[in-house]
Image (cartoon, rainbow, N blue to C red):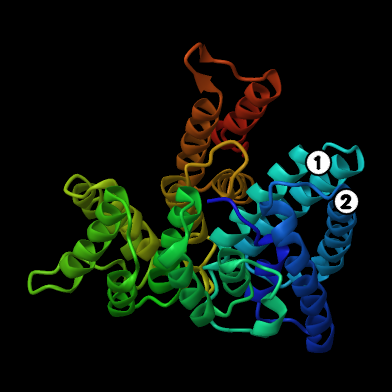
Amino acid sequence: MRKLALLTILLFSCHSYADQAELSAVMQHLGDSLLKLIPLVQDQDIDQAALTEEVKRLQGYVHEAEPHFEDQPVTAHVTYDMLKDRIDEAASLAEQKSLLSAKSLLAESMELCASCHAQDRKSKLSFGVSRLRDLDEFQAAEFSFLSRDYESALVSYQAFLKTGKDEYRRSQALDRILAITTEIYGDMDAANKVLNEVNLISDSEKYRVKSWTMLFEKLQGENAIQNPSVHGTPREIEQFLDTDWRELQSFMSWSEQQAYWMLIRRQLTTLLEQNPTADEMPLLLYWMAVADRSTHFQFHESLSRRYLESCMTRYTTHRYAKYCFDEFELLMLVSFSGSGGINMPIEIREEINRLRRLVYTPVSE
């Protein structure tokens, strides 16, 4: 899953801005930029001048948005900081005419944004169907999703799946449908309805969708398995994830686990919205990192890494700081492992050692 969400998602997600007029203006600019960037990033041909100009414009909007994150939760800060770093790098690459690298970096940033988009479910915006005339069906679906018009997005993803042949895009469309109906809507009936109506053309697609719908049946059946939403406190979700969920996983296919992780992420996000205490925040950050890694398989530069770093540096003496370090070290080992063994840069080894000292060195009296 790599697409264009960019900072638009974050700004559409945050819902406590002091200056609504300023917010509306920033959102309008971001929507305009998104319409231009989607085809520039997804199309095969590269329009050097247009891409460079739009990335620079986007970079300006990103920096302009920074003050709006002062009162946002730690997860919003984590995502914003990561986005700013990556978009700054993309702008630099575009200026150096490294356009393929800039496009790749933007595409990865887009998926990062898309994953965090699901963390807020309160508002829906519409920029008008007429504005989508220069986009193909899949790109229109992406724009609707990223501008929080979920109903239109579902319609467009279904329309794309009727005729679209590109396997990568088809897989992305199915993932988006799953995310909207489960992680954003939290509605398994809606998920079943939409998934039973989509056009599936391969055995792998049919297997994935069947696995998802079978999981929803298990969650809603007479002898239902546990739904993460019943765990209404950080300590309850911690106990569930640390014990029952490990056992449940052993009886699920990977596709079933994917759908279940989205329900877990929805509940973790709900708990993060309820002003967790300093004692509760580290365990939520840890499990958000594990959930993100388990669903996106991104390691070195990922939201998982940023959540873990925040856990270790903000809550150094908490017992979960050590869990976060162990998960962080695993992420780095996987990132730099290959057929030839582990080829980890010295700066990453030094960072691991620095964080190990941070969380394992006793605080002097």
Q: CA distance from mark 1 to mark 2?
A: 8 Å
Q: Quadrant of the C terminus?
A: top right
- Give percent across and percent down for residue 72: 67, 70
**Residue displayed at 45% across by 63% down:** 163
- Identify the residue at horizontal 74%, vertical 81% (top origin): 17
Q: Is residue 278 left or right of residue 128?
A: left
Q: Residue furthest front?
A: 163
Residue 210 visible to an observer of this rendering: yes
Q: Position of residue 135 (x, y in %)?
A: 66, 68
Which element type, helix, strand or loop, lies under badge 1? helix
The residue that disc 2 covers is: 52
Where, by quadrant of the figure, is residue 350 drawn? top right
For residue 73, which numbered disc appears in the image?
none
- Image coordinates of residue 269 in percent, x first then y, are 48, 67
Identify the residue at horizontal 56%, vertical 45% (top origin). Answer: 308
Amino acid at the residue labelled 1: Leu
Q: Is residue 337 above or below residue 118?
A: above
Question: Mark 1 packing: few (<14 Cα in 10 Å), some, or many (20+)?
Answer: many
For label 1, the residue is 99
| Rendered view: 37 above or below 299 | below
Q: Specify whether 358 is left or right of 227.
A: right
Residue 268 appears in view: no
Measured along the vertical axis of the image, is residue 337 above or below residue 249? above
Of residues 195 and 230, the one drawn nearer to the viewer in this rendering: 195
Q: Are marks 1 and 2 in contact (CB under 8 Å)?
A: yes
> Can you name the residue that lies furthest to the left here?
222
- Could you tell me how many numbered marks the image carries? 2
Front residue (pair 155, 261): 155
- Label 2 is placed on what type of residue? Thr
Q: Residues within 10 Å of mark 2 (few under 14, many from 20)?
A: many
Picture quadrant where residue 266 is located: bottom left
In the foreground, 317 or 180: 180
